Image: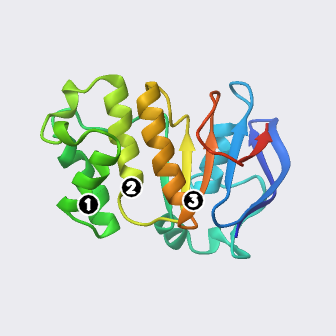
């Protein structure tokens, strides 16, 4: 069980949000909705352990994730606004460090690229990818290794309909295996049965 308990976030003297709580069971999904600046990205950063909450706590099976940040980092995959691709490296070379962290190899990288429809572009430098292809390459990182929690910030940014459909297959497979998803979005996501938290 992944949960936030009475979490608050402040920017300077202003509360972005306060007393925010939720629980997410295996297979569950939570959509973060709200206007720009409402705190969706800040909440994701708190959930990832990249930002400390001003109040409250984030827990995994009842234990505060701040007690063991390294263990919490190993159980999640983070996808931010930026694709984090080095232009001079090939698509495969960009994914290699993530594969190494997950303890998987070249075959898993190719399988992850195939899942997002990028296998034919595996040896191309990232600089030649379109914006949508770059986003799909970033999404391929989610499929490398088994991490139970995916934290996603506008994951479908720049994707066409077919790519969103492929992403939906990845999400469904992850949830069917007991994985959890928390996603900030302004657009509909292929997450049937997801709860919505409005900020």
**Residue positioned 70% across, 40% down in the render:** 32
Q: Which residue is mark 2?
A: 143
Give x and y (percent) for residue 58: 71, 63
The answer, for residue 116, to whether it is visible in the render is: yes
Residue with the most extreme right position: 19
**In the image: residue 90, left or right of residue 76:** left
- Apparent side of residue 22 relative to residue 71 in the rendered image (left or right): right
Residue 34: quadrant of the picture: top right
For marks 3 and 1 on the same chain, the one whose residue lies earlier in the sequence: 1
| The C terminus lies in quadrant | top right
Viewed as shown, does residue 36 lie left or right of 110? right
Dot 2 alpha-carbon crowd within 10 angstroms: few under 14, some 14 to 19, many 20 or more: many
Distance CA(mark 1)–CA(mark 2): 8 Å
Contact? badges 1 and 2 (CB < 8 Å):
yes
Q: Is residue 159 above or below residue 13?
A: above
Q: Residue at x 42, y 30 (%)?
A: 162
Q: Name the foreground residue: 60 vs 173.
A: 173
| 51 left or right of 137 in image | right
Q: State the residue position of label 3.
A: 175
Task: Give the Cα separation between the discs numbered 3 and 1.
Answer: 19 Å
Q: Nearer the viewer, mark 3 or mark 2?
A: 3
Q: Secondary structure at mark 3?
A: helix
Residue 83, disc:
none
State the CA–CA distance, disc 3 to disc 2. Answer: 12 Å
N-terminal-most mark, 1 or 2: 1
Q: What element does badge 1 sit on?
A: helix
Position above or below: 123 against 30: above
Residue at horizontal 76 percent and vertical 52 percent from the top: 54
Q: Earlier in the sequence, mark 3 or mark 2?
A: 2
Q: How is the image coloured?
A: rainbow
* Residue under label 1: 108
Residue drawn at the location 69% of the way across and 49% of the way down:
30
């Amino acid at each position: 069980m992944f949960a936030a308990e009475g979490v608050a976030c402040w920017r300077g003297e202003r509360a972005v949000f306060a007393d925010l709580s939720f629980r997410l069971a295996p297979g569950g999904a939570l959509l973060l909705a709200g206007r720009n600046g409402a705190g969706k990205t800040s909440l994701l950063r708190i959930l990832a352990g990249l930002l400390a909450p001003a109040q409250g706590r984030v827990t995994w099976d009842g234990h505060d994730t701040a007690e063991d940040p390294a263990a919490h980092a190993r159980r999640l995959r983070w996808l931010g606004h930026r694709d984090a691709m080095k232009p001079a490296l090939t698509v495969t070379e960009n994914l290699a460090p993530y594969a190494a962290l997950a303890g998987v190899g070249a075959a898993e990288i190719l399988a992850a690229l195939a899942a997002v429809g990028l296998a034919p572009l595996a040896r191309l430098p990232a600089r030649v990818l379109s914006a949508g292809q770059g986003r799909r390459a970033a999404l391929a990182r989610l499929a490398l290794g088994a991490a139970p929690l995916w934290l996603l910030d506008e994951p479908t940014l720049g994707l066409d309909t077919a790519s969103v459909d492929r992403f939906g297959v990845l999400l469904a497979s992850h949830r069917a295996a007991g994985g959890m998803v928390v996603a900030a979005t302004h657009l509909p996501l292929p997450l049937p049965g997801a709860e919505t938290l409005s900020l």
